[in-house]
Every structure is written in C-alpha cells, then in structure tokens.
Image (cartoon, rainbow, N blue to C red):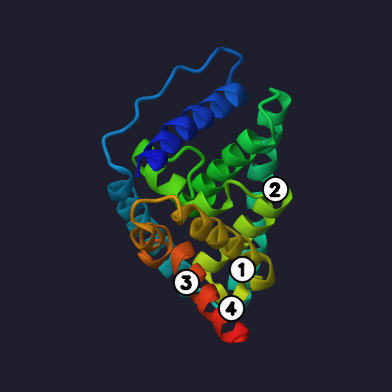
Amino acid sequence: MTWIIVAVVVILVLFFLMSGKKQSAAPAALPPAGKLSPEDSRRKLEAEFARNKLRFQAMPDDEAKEIMAALHTDAETHWDHAYNTASADAKGAPFATQLALFRTAAVILTGEQQPDESFFGGLDLETVPFKELPPDQAKAAFFEYCVAKYSPQHADWNVLNPALLKFADKVFGDSKSQSNPDGYVYEMIYRETLDWQKFLAEALSNRAKANA
C-alpha cells in the first residue's frame, strides 16, 4: 500500500497549493500530513458521507433529481478550476487530472470547500481508478461515480462502467508482476471496502456473464 501513502502526500501538497493560489499570491506552506492512516481516513470519510447520503435519501424524488443536477454543476466548477490551475502552471495533464479529481472529491463527498486533513487519505482512495484515465474520461466517469455513491439509479453507468473496467484490466495486467497475484487483485478490487470496488466487482461479473 506504499503507493497509496505516497499519492496521498502528493495530493495534499497539490490541494493546498491550489487553495493558497486562489486566495493569495503568497506561496503556500507544506501542510502537516495528518495522523490518520489511509484506511482510518477512509472509515472516517465513509461515516461522514453516510450521514450526507441519509439526508439525500430522505428527499422527495423531484428534489433529489434537482440535487443530482446541482451536483454535476458543482463538480464541474471545482474540476475546471483545479484542472486549469494546474495546467496554467505547466504541470501536465496527468498531474492536473489528479488534482482535479482530489478537489472534486473533497467538495462533493464532504460538502466542504477545504475539508479537514483527516479526510485526505480517504479522498485519495476514492479517486484511484480514475487517475490514469485521459482527462475528459476521468472527469465524466468521476462525476458519474459521485452521483452513483448518492443514488445509483441516477448515474449513467454507460459512462462509469467502461472507466472502471479499464482500471480492472490494468489491475489484472499488473498482478502478473506481483509476488501474490490473487492477493493483489483482491486488495485492489474484491476487497470491496470502497464503493467503486463494489461497482467494479459487479461490472466484472456482468461482463463475464455477457461473454459466457
């Protein structure tokens, strides 16, 4: 799991550089890394999101649809700001995509402009399968993932599933170079502690049935 910890540290720096640039021309200081492990951070984020989801599920259907439309709009605003900020600094598309993913996840999944750093590890884990996608695909798929977390019936699975399956194919390929291929695939997909892992496991099952 070392790669996850390294990614969290990188995204921490990106997030605060972006926030600092928006608010002031002064250089942003490196933030403390936080005390929670990625797994503990994931659990904390899951509990926070569960409360937000319960409030959403209590809404009438018409209001829920309006919230989903607003979610798309809000996500696009934060994505564009983060991506354009990184691009303006000539950071490159992969770097800009990871920053935009993290920024969008932070706002949409916690409801806060600048969430407590104890959420950062969990937020980074939520973006894992989208990080290496082309920017436009990452943007569209992650938007649908955020919608699916709140309300699966409102998500466009024709956008989300191909992105998740692309990640799965990479995991299967990477597993061949691991000392424990089955264990690697289990941790990356079938552990199902994250919603995208649950969605991906179902997508893989459906693909296998279709190809049988």
In the figure, is residue 103 to the left or right of 178? right
Q: How far is disc 2 from disc 3 in space, using C-alphas?
A: 22 Å
Which residue type carries mark 1?
Asn
Residue that label 3 marks? 201
- As measured in the structure, the alpha-carbon distance from the residue carrying label 3 to the one carrying label 1 is 10 Å
Could you give the CA–CA distance between mark 4 and mark 2, rounded to whole angstroms? 23 Å
> Circle 1 sits in a helix, a strand or a loop, which is it?
helix
Q: Which residue appears at 33% of the width and 60% of the height?
A: 183
The C terminus lies in quadrant: bottom right
Q: Earlier in the sequence, mark 1 or mark 4?
A: 1
For this rendering, which residue is in front, 110 or 85?
85
Q: Residues within 10 Å of mark 2 (few under 14, many from 20)?
A: few
Q: CA distance from mark 1 to mark 2?
A: 15 Å
Q: Please provide percent x and percent y for residue 174.
A: 49, 52
Badge nearest the viewer, 1 or 4: 4
Q: In this orientation, does residue 73 appear?
A: no
Q: Closer to the N terminus: mark 3 or mark 1?
A: 1
Q: Residue 161: which numbered mark, if any? A: 1
Query: Neighbour class for label 3 at 10 Å: few (<14), some, many (≥20)?
Result: some
Furthest residue to the top? 26
Is the residue under label 1 in contact with that under label 3 (CB below 8 Å)?
A: no
Which quadrant does the N terminus fall into?
top left
Residue that numbered label 2 is attached to = 134
Amino acid type of the residue tagged 3 in the rendering: Ala
**Amino acid type, mark 2:** Pro
On screen, 148 above or below 118? below
Confirm or deny contact between disc 2 and disc 3 (CB under 8 A): no
Q: Amino acid at mark 4?
A: Arg
